[in-house]
Image (spheres, coloured by chain):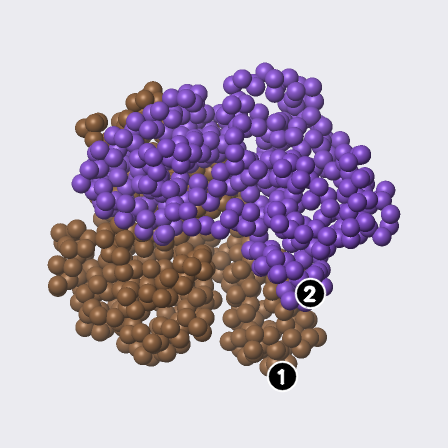
Chain colours: A brown, B purple
Amino acid sequence: MNALETLQHYFNYHAFQTGQRAVIDDLNEGHDVLLTLPTGAGKSICYQVPALMNDGLTLVVTPLLSLMEDQVRHLKAHGIKRVAALNSFNTTTERQHVLKNLKLLKILYISPELLQQDWILKRLKQLSVRFFVVDEAHCISQWGHEFRPDYMKLESVLQSLKHPTLLLVTATLTADVKRDIYQHFSSRQIKEHLHMIDRDNISFIVEKCSSNYEKDRYIVDCLSTYHVPTIIYFSSKKETERVSHYLKEHVPTHRIAYYHGDLENNERMLIQQQFLSGELDVICATSAFGMGVNKKDVRLVMHYHLPTQIESFVQEVGRAGRDHLHSVSISLVTEHDRLITERLIEGEMIEENVLLQLFRLLDQQTHLDLALFSDTHQLNEIHRRYLQNYLENHDIITDNKTINHHKLTDQFKDTWVRTVTERQQFKRKKLFELLLALSDDRCIRRSIYQPFQHDINKDRFGCCSVCGFRLAQFEPIQLQTSIENLTWEDKLNRRIRPYTEV
Amino acid sequence: MFRYLMIYLLKTINSNRSPAAIYHILTGKKSSQTIQDLHLFQLHTYYRLLPNLSRQAFDYDVDQMVNEGLMEWLNAKDYRLTDKAWDYLSTYKDTCDEAHNFERPIDHQSKEIFTKRFYLTIQTFTQRVMDDTGFIPLIDDITIQAFVKQYYHLHKHALRDWLEQCYEQLYDVLKTYPDIRRHIYLDRLSTANHNGQSLQQLVDRYHVTEADILLTLALIERTLFIRSQQHQTLLSDLLPADNQPKIYERLMTRSARKTHQLVIKGYKIEDLIQLRQLKRGTIEDHLVEICMLDDHFKLDDYVEEEKIAIIESYLSKRHTQKLAELKRTLPEEMTYLDLRLVFAHYQKRLHQ
């Protein structure tokens, strides 16, 4: 089968979307590729099609466990069964099952952490790996908004795999990140496929509010006018619940639910599926919602709270209007939002005094128990891995714990502290950049897409509130749904005998 | 409904344990203490009735009961049911008691497999009958998926017949439940045109607690399971084959099962510690567990006969369930292990 036939056979699409074909051709010819496409423009097709056309295994490294599971489910639902995921969520049985059937697989999704385990790597080395895909490639860069220390070792993994063809994918490539990617993979010849990521069918609105109450009221008014598929983003789990209850009470015509990372896996799946199939209209969610949620007709994305940088904002907004129809992004901002977001940033980062404590410990001891150190200082898993990788990369610890005191110089310490402080400042700068982009003196569309590209497409339905767009100009097709109100007999009939309904 | 069950269970354990003991029974904790409680208070039928009940949801119901004046705390662990609780029991006896008063314990492992198979079959068959192929399976467990796949191939030419019969069966079961219960059950189902509601959504819609939702689902699932076991029905095909270990062995923790094998061969406690390379305390826990579950356990292999006689005579006079009291009152040479083993053995015979 050629590329088009593969697409039609497996995915039931008639034609490729912009950019896909060229990437697939380059990969098939063995060229390494760096790819940017806007969210929802079919990035995964770019490696799934070559993976299915060619012999050998395609490895996909992705940091997002939920995305991994979604992709596997999605492919299986299309009848593509030779796919699997390896990550820390696997049960032992599942993992053994995958490893036993490794030779039969066409596509294997794997987390960067597991890819570094020797026993897994040993198994992979025995196979012929045709493509090595790095999803969310911006995670390689310290300046990426989701830096993952484990990504720093991908190059050496790649080396040990007898050089499969490399594909790097991201939706958010800034100049800093691009430089780091090239530096990391300096031995490779990379072809660029960089596409405009701005979305010409989305209009942007920034609404200044003086309190949460005002935000709540604004959303009630807005939803009362617009009964359309809507996502509202929050930075706090509690608030998703509170506002969801508030809205249920005040907009009783809409079917509303909340979604965040504390919900049981199964419960989360149900909510997600309901939203996808149109059984829910409005979802109040944290950023945990949306990865791999491919719903075409989301009309409205609201931000009750802002994320910590433009990259996340662009991704979240990008969940609207994948069917290319007019969609709107509304950001509700108050003066003190900035404080909330700053606190978030502090939680993400290792603090300087933690490093100083670590140095004191390293000076005094011969062996380092990093797990214990992490527990005493209440560091999360990402922090712990960051520390471990940094110490290993600089040969401060070997064999997992023995400390090399002669490497532990003042210069080493100073550099590290400086790196951390710089990163803190960098994070603040990113936040400031987002706040600035959403302040009302410059075109909002231009401001948020500017870090990723020089120019932007002409808007199709109205630009932004700075350029004169008003919500009243938004005239989407409204949903005609109502809350199910049946007797139990009718309900039973509808559930078990769906064919009698038609 | 859950409220009634809680009061009933709290009444049964009669302030001898903290409410947490009930939580462990309902979720099916595999600990010596919980297994012991099952025997002591004769609560086998409730073991693992609600495997997915979260501690948070359970505590919420306990707090509610305190707020409503049904129970009160005497200190951090001990509680007392109020008169209001007793009134509650008699008021709702007619409507609730029947639903909870299980005749005999069921094999909960089989029930869980059966239930998962049932849910996935309904989802698959309704999707397929509507010619919808690309759906996300509700159950991730690959062994369940493999079963349903085979089952589907058996029935794929007569899906409507299967669904018609299934409809009749569900109708018969659901018509015996109060309206709110059957609505909850039907809303939770994932089928062709309907994704199941999350627990939280059901809580909001029906104004009941999460524990209540879980209990509703569990009771209906249980009825379907028992019917399929007792009569040859459409759904009997979904029962797992009976090649499982004996019930008492299944109740044991895996580690205790290993110790059990050695106990059968007659090893003494010092040998067990050596052979199993475990701490004395752990082996002692195992012995108590084995003593309760295995009818052939030889008590006098582990406790001297005179000691057994003394402890049993005390137990027959004083109906205590507190080990600390035994330890305080009886001669000092009685170890805790002696007391625990004899006590367990005594309780077991009492209920046989």
* Residue at (64% x, 81% y) in the render: A405
The residue pinned by badge 2 equals: B271
Residue A141 visible to an observer of this rendering: no
Label 2 is found on which chain of the structure?
Answer: B
B310 relative to A247 in the view: left or right: right
Image location (x, y in percent) of residue A95: 41, 62
Please determine whether, in this image, residue B224 is positioned above or below residue A144.
Answer: above
Discs 2 and 1 share one subunit: no
Left or right: where A317 falls relative to B314: left
Residue B97 locus on image (x, y percent): 54, 23
Label 2 environment density (alpha carbons within 10 Å; few <14, some 14–19, many ≥20):
few
Relative to B14, is A79 above or below?
A: below
Q: Quadrant of residue B272?
A: bottom right
Mark 1 chain: A
- Type of the residue with mark 1: His
Q: Residue at x 55, y 43 (%)?
A: B28
Residue at 52% x, 30% y: name it: B102
Q: Position of residue B348 (x, y in %)?
A: 66, 41
User: Which three-letter amino acid code belongs to the residue tagged 2?
Assistant: Asp
Rendering quarter of residue B257: bottom right
Q: Which residue is mark 1?
A: A406
Viewer-proximal residue among B303 and A477? B303
